[in-house]
Image (tube, rainbow, N blue to C red):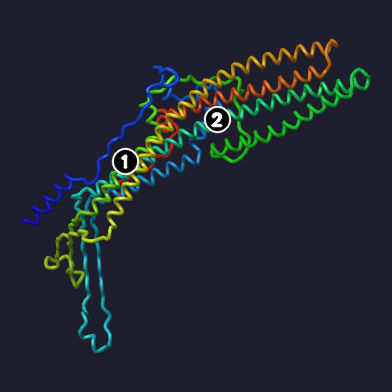
Amino acid sequence: MNKFLLLVLGIVLTGCFKVGPDYKRPEIDIPTHWRNKETDTLLKATNSKWWKQLGDPVLNRLITQAIQGNYDLKIAIANVEQFMGLYGSTRSNLFPQISGSFTYQHPQLTTSPLSQFRNKQDYLNLGGGLNWQIDIWGALRRANEAAMADLLSQEATRQAVMLTLVSQVAQTYITLRQLDKQLEITKNTVATLKEGLHINTIRFQEGYTSELEVEQTDSEYQRRSAQIPQYEQRIALTENALNVLLGKNPGPVERGLPLDKLKLPAIPAGLPSDLLIRRPDIAQAEQQLISANAQIGVARAQYFPTIALTGNVGQISTQAASLFAPGANFWSIGSAIAAPIFTAGKIAGQVQAAKAVQKAALANYKLAIITGFSEFENALVSLIKTKEQAEKQVKRVGANRKYFNLSRIRYEEGYVDYITELDAIRQLFDAQVEETSVRAETYGSAINLYLAMGGGWIVAEEKSANLPKPKQAVYFP
């Protein structure tokens, strides 16, 4: 009865103590304002599938293909399943471990004089054993807490991969359409220069112009012609990079709307800080901090005695027929207590190391937060300023196109030489290329802004894409 009471008392105490510090979320220095005012449409914008606002069905299909085929995402899903298994393994330590055994021995007689002292009968042993470590000090529960945090950290990593993947596909597609447009501009300019070179060559042969104009035109024509294979090379490399994101072999990529026909996603003017700290990378850093905090308790628990209950039950017989006879039964129950007496600083060193890991995890968590704030602020500023640049570049292109048209008319009427028209061609080309670059940069800033915000669309997109679900840790396989 006394042993039974001690067992009950030990089990009751199992839920009473947990050595080590309980986790409390650190206080965060949150920005009180952004460069723009906050809007009520923020949460809706953050949780929406923002890439669909660009209005390009081809881009939508590419993103769907990437979610289903990207190998980095497949690796992240498999890693979650791995940590689910590790959590299940750690959780099992809280419960009794039951095992079974069967032993059969058949002695072989010999002619040795000593054989008469040997057991000449068969020996059968069928039994089961139990081993249960009573978690009085909470070491196993702290380990379980750490394993759960590690699992949630991997879940956040998977969401971060999804978030980054969609942004990378959109960014790469925008870059591809930018290069397509710049290649088109270059080919049109080369065609214009080729026409001018042909005309100036004839005029030179007839004595209406100098050889200087012919050579200047030819120089500009060759210069712009050399840029065509450069753009074609960059386009091919960008297509290959996009195919890697899609999980496909290198090859051409389907095109949709041209760059100037895409729509800029609706951008919220501000971001509440409590929404920003729900980014996957920040959630991952916090779970790593929770795990490190729990590991301090695991280390400290080594200072205290460990108590284990053991038991055995079974049948012993010398004949298989009598294995289950009443007289063949046996059972035993016991307990074992082990406590450290002198470890030469081993436990103290492990506690110190666990505390240091926790400090590093805390610093990493705070760094992730201020990095998130900084990335959002940077993307917001970039978006505002690139939109301003884009507006100026559109006006610049208009002015240079007018300059080109007027210079051509005056050249054809004989009021100016071809050098003036050639200068107008150069300036119009530069203005068009830079306008395309700034337009693409504006889209990129908008994409980076949504990337910095995280977003609630990830879970819904995973469901609609029918991604494989990591297997849950179970008690019985």
Q: Is residue 231 above or below residue 413?
A: below
Earlier along the polypeptide chain: callout 1 or callout 2? 2
Residue drawn at 79 percent across, 14 percent down: 408
Which residue carries the number 1 mark?
Answer: 290
Tell me the quarter of the picture where residue 198 sits. Answer: top right
Element on which disc 2 rests: helix
Q: Mark 1 or 2, which is nearer the eye? A: 1
The CA distance from mark 1 to mark 2 is 34 Å
Identified by mark 1, the residue type is Ile
Query: Is residue 476 toward the left or the right of residue 197 in the image?
Result: left
Q: Residues within 10 Å of mark 2 (few under 14, many from 20)?
A: many
Tell me the quarter of the picture where residue 127 sits. Answer: bottom left
Q: Which mark is residue 171?
A: 2
Count of picture labels? 2
Residue 332 in the image: state x and y as whole percent: 14, 63
Residue drawn at 18 percent across, 56 percent down: 307
